[in-house]
Amino acid sequence: RGIKAVIPPKSNRKEEIQCDYWLYKERHAVECMFGKLKHYRRIATRYEKKAINYMGMLSFASVLLWLR
């Protein structure tokens, strides 16, 4: 699927392991956005049966979060 693990190393590790911190920051932002969207009950339980209606609710909730 092309997914790359982004796990930062512990600060007290003896060997230095490289980590892409920019990618870590981007992934964290995406995970926080999904967490905020899950606060809306209608999106978390997916009451809409059609995908187009669900996408509309996702767009609406995203706009509400953006306006905050």
Image (tube, helix red, strand yellow):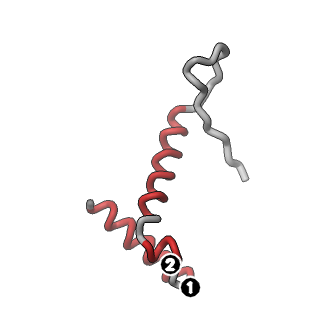
Q: Closest to the observer: 28 or 42?
A: 42
Q: Position of residue 29 (x, y in %)?
A: 46, 48
Q: What's the CA distance linking mark 1 and mark 2?
A: 6 Å
Q: Closest to the observer: 50 or 47?
A: 47
> Do the numbered discs 1 and 2 sit on residues whose CB atoms are within 8 Å?
yes
Specify whether 17 is left or right of 36: right
For this orientation, the residue located farthest to the bottom is 49
> Which residue type carries mark 1?
Lys
Element marked by disc 2: helix
Q: Which residue is mark 2?
A: 54
Specify whether 46 is left or right of 1: left
Q: Is residue 53 above or below residue 68?
A: below
Q: Which residue is mark 1?
A: 50
For this orientation, the residue located farthest to the top is 14
> How many neighbours does mark 1 have within 10 angstroms: few (below 14), some (14-19), or many (20 or more)?
few
For this orientation, the residue located farthest to the right is 1
Q: Position of residue 60 (x, y in %)?
A: 37, 73
Q: Quadrant of the C terminus?
A: bottom left
> Which residue type carries mark 2?
Tyr
Q: Is residue 53 above or below residue 33?
A: below
Quarter of the image where one finds residue 16: top right
Which residue: 52% across, 32% down? 21
Q: Which mark is residue 23?
A: none
> How many neighbours does mark 2 have within 10 angstroms: few (below 14), some (14-19), or many (20 or more)?
some
Quarter of the image where one finds residue 18: top right
Which residue: 65% across, 22% down? 17
Element marked by disc 1: loop
